[in-house]
Amino acid sequence: MPTDADYFFTAGQKHEGPPLLTAKMPAKAKYKKPDKLLEKPDAIVIGSGIGGMGMASLLAQKKHMKVLLLESSPVPGGCTHVHEIDGFEFASGVDSVGDMDPRVGRGMYRPAIDFLTGGKLKWAKMPEVHEVCTFGDEVYDWYSTHEKNIEWVEKKFPGEGNVRAYYDLEKKIESWATTWALTKLAPEWMPVGMRDGIYFGAWRKYMDRHVLDVFKNELGFSDRLAAIFCYMYGNHGRTPDKAPFSFHSVNLGHYRNGAYFPAGGPGQIAECIVPIVEAAGGQLAVSTAVKQIMVENGQVTGVELENGEKVFCKLVFSAAGAPTTFLEMLDPELSAKLGYAEKFKEIGPSPSHVYLLLGYDEAIDLPKHIVWEMPTYEGVGRYDISKADELYKGQGVLKGMGGYLLSPSARDPLHSERYPNTSTVVALAEGIPDWVARAKKDTVWRDEFAAGLGENLMKIVERHMPMLKGKTPKLRLSGIPMGCNPNAWHGSSLGLDPSAERFVKHTHWLRPRTKIGGLWLTGQDAFSAGFAGSMLSSKVTYAAWTGNYLSMLM
C-alpha cells in the first residue's frame, strides 16, 4: 500500500526534477524577454497564471500544439510566481493548497496538477495542525481531518452547535457543485434558461444564504462557534454576513485532508510547466504585454502587443481575467455591443492585499503552520467579524487589525538548499479598491499608510513568532497591494468578487466560451477563485473547447 513518502516530499530528500530557483539564479535572472516571437503559433495564451500555464500544458501534451504563452510581467507564474527581493524569496499567492493527497477527499486536484506539471512537481505535507486562528487571547488549532476538529469542538463547546451536521452539509453541498460546473460546459446553442435548469441542488440553494444565517439559524451555532468556523473568511474575501455559505463551506472543505506546499516554492510550478510547452515547440514570452485582442467579423485574428507588433492566430485563450480581457483588450465598442462592458457595472472586484515582508539573514526555526488573527477593536464584540472588518476597511483603523501570517522558508523543505542561511515571513491583510487607487496617486499617503500597516502587522508577527523579538530583519517592506498580478483590476487577488451573484446570476457568461469566435476564457474568472479554481479552469476550458467533456476526468 502506498505511503506518504510515495506522494510527498520531506526534508532531507534529494530533489529530482527541473532546476530549482535559487538566490544565485532567481526567476528574474533566468527569464528574459525574447528577441523574436514564435512565428505562426497554433494557439496564443494570454497570461501565465496557473490557468494560462495549465491551458498551454494541456494543448502541448494532448494536441501537440505550438503555444505562444504571453506574460506582461518579467517572470511567469501569476499567483504561483515569487517575489525575489534583495536575496529573499516571497510567495505572491500560493501559501497553502488543499486536496493534494489523491488517496482521500475529492481526489481530482492532485491528478490534475501532476498531469499539468508532467509529474515533476513535488508537494510537502504541512503539520497536522496546519492552521491556527485567534480571537484576542483565545487560540484554536485546526486539524487536517474533520474527525479531530469535531472532537475538539464538541469538547470545548458542548451544546453550542451541531458540528457533525455542518460537516455532513459541507459534503452535501460539495457533491451538488457538479451542476454548477456543467453550466461552464454548456454549448452556445443552449438557451440560458435551459442552462439554468441544470443548475440546482444544495450548492445553488446555499449560495442564496449567507454564512451566519446557516451557522446560527440552521445549525444552531452560538455567536462564538459561528465566528470560529468563519476564521478562514479571508480565503474568499467576503465577511460572514455577506459570504455565500456554499463557497465558504467548500473553502473549509478544501483543507479537510490537510494542507500542502510545493517543494522548491511556488515558483517551481512554472519551472515544471514551461519546459513542457517548449518541448512541443511553444514559447514563453515574458515582459510582453498585450495591448489588444484583434477581431474581424466576430472572429479573433490574433493579438497586438504594446510595442505595436502583431501576432496572427485564430485561437486565443485569455487567462488575464475577465475585466482585463473584455474591458481593456477588446475594442470598447465591440465590448459594449456584445454586452460585456455592462456586466462589470453589476459585479465588482475581490479584495486586494496589503503586506509586510520580512527577510532575516540567518536560519531561524519558524513554525510551519499558518496563523489567522481576527481583528480586535475596542467596543466591538470579540466574535463580530463583520463589524470589526468595517472599522478596518471602512474607516481605515489599523490598530487592532487582523492578519494572516506564515513563513514561506519554514514551509518549503528545500529552502535551505535554495536560499541558505535565510528566513522569511509574510503577513497579509485584505485591502480595498480605494486604497489601491489612492496609493497610485498620493505617494505621501501611500508611504504613511504603508508604515502604519507594517507597524501593526509586525505586532501580529511578534505575538505569534516570539523567537523573532529582538532580531532585526535585513529586509522589511510593507505596502499596497500584494498580489499575483500587479495589473489586476483594482489590484484584486481573487479575480471578480466571489459573491452569490457571481456563482448564480453571472455564471452563464463567466465561462470558457465567449461571444467571439476563437476567443476563450480561462483562469479564476472563468471557473472559480484561487489556485485550485484556476488550475481546474484549464481543464474546464480544454473540455469546452474540444467538446470532449470526458477529458475532465483525465
Image (cartoon, grey):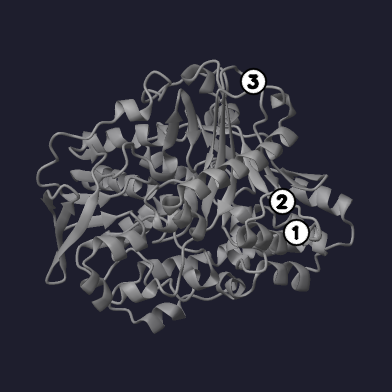
In this rendered view, identify the residue nearer to me: 73 or 443: 443
In this rendered view, identify the residue nearer to me: 90 or 210: 90
Of the residues under marks 1 and 3, which one precedes in the sequence?
A: 1
Q: CA distance from mark 2 to mark 3?
A: 26 Å
Which residue carries the number 2 mark? Answer: 374
Quadrant location of residue 209? bottom right
Query: Dividing the image into 4 quarters, which one contains the N terminus?
Result: top right
- Determine contact: label 1, label 2, CB under 8 Å: yes
51 horizontally vs 158: left or right: left
Which residue carries the number 3 mark? Answer: 364
Q: Residue at x 25, y 31 (%)?
A: 32
Type of amino acid at the residue the image marks with label 1: Ala
Q: Secondary structure at mark 2?
A: loop
Of the residues under marks 2 and 3, which one precedes in the sequence?
A: 3
Can you see residue 3? no
Which residue carries the number 1 mark? Answer: 227
